[in-house]
Amino acid sequence: MLGKSDTSVESDVNVLWSKYQDDGDPAIRDALILNYSPLVKYVASRVSVGRPQNVEHADLVSYGMFGLIDAIDKFEPDRGFKFETYAISRIKGAILDELRSIDWVPRSVRSKVRSVEKAFAKLEAREGRAPTDDEVAAELGWTEPQFQQVLSQIAVVGMAALDEILLVGGDRGEALTLGDTIADSSNGPTGAFEATETRQMLSQAINGMPQREKVVLTLYYYESLTLSEIGRVLGVTESRVCQIHTKAMIQLRSRLAGLEREPD
């Protein structure tokens, strides 16, 4: 079947952007929304991993559409950034904001996350390296299988909730996710400096993590692989990848908190 080439499609989209920037025609805006709507479904699918049964995939798509519309309204093509990268962060942020507003993460899960995070921070400060699973379990008074079970329980709340819990200042506030560090969400020189500083902190924190956790974060957030695809790369089950991701996010939060406390 014949169809437009990627170059032709990109050219058409560039024309739409040019016209929309010139006169803000609502009809052109609608055309841009339609063109980029698959991005919303993509982000919603990734956020929906392990979501509670009361959160429908269609709801996530609906929340994400507001993020897409906001991205289209605020995007500046002349700055040289890819819209897709910018929009994914906005879409995910809109979904997380809505999930946060309905307080969908159980308090028991938040409590377990904090307990594990504190254990990681304490052991890492004492040993000067990333602690093993056995060491963390012992610090918490659990067996290693119990620790793995807790990681699985935490992971059940979903990747979106982990982003919310682990990279947010407290239970509420502005989310700082890995996606936000890829996209350009700055507002002038100050915002650009802060985004660059955040990327540097994340890079430093991730590079100091054990190899397997580092690989999972890189493949999931920067290469956009699914959990099952990462499992095939590592030769482990999808559920094991989910556990590794959960542990990596907790370690990352602990490391970032430590970096923020370091003196200048």
Image (tube, rainbow, N blue to C red):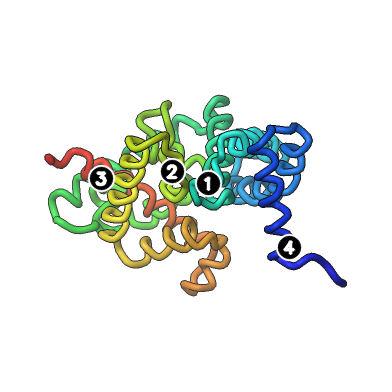
* Residue shown at the point (42%, 51%) measured from the top left: 246
Lower position in the chain sequence, tag 3 or tag 4:
4
Front tag of 3 and 1: 1
| Three-letter residue code for mark 1 | Asp
Q: Which mark is residue 78?
A: 1
Q: Position of residue 260 (x, y in %)?
A: 22, 40
Task: Find numbered disc 2 in the image and state the secondary structure of the residue it sits on.
Answer: loop
Front tag of 4 and 2: 4
Q: Is residue 150 visible?
A: no
Q: Quadrant of the C terminus?
A: top left
| Three-letter residue code for mark 3 | Ala
Lower position in the chain sequence, tag 1 or tag 2:
1
Lower position in the chain sequence, tag 3 or tag 2:
3
Task: Find numbered disc 1 in the image and state the secondary structure of the residue it sits on.
Answer: helix
Q: Vertically, is 141 above or below 128?
A: above
Residue denoted by label 2:
177
Lower position in the chain sequence, tag 3 or tag 1:
1
* Residue shown at the point (24%, 56%) measured from the top left: 135
* Residue shown at the point (43%, 43%) measured from the top left: 177
Q: Distance between the residues labelled 4 and 2?
A: 34 Å
Lower position in the chain sequence, tag 4 or tag 2:
4
Residue denoted by label 4:
8
Front tag of 1 and 2: 1
Q: Quadrant of the N terminus?
A: bottom right
Q: Distance between the residues labelled 4 and 1?
A: 20 Å
Lower position in the chain sequence, tag 4 or tag 1:
4
Q: Can residue 181 be seen in this view?
A: yes
| Three-letter residue code for mark 2 | Thr
Give the left or right position of residue 73, taking residue 27 as reference. left
Residue denoted by label 3:
119
Residue 217 placement: quadrant: bottom left
Task: Find numbered disc 3 in the image and state the secondary structure of the residue it sits on.
Answer: helix
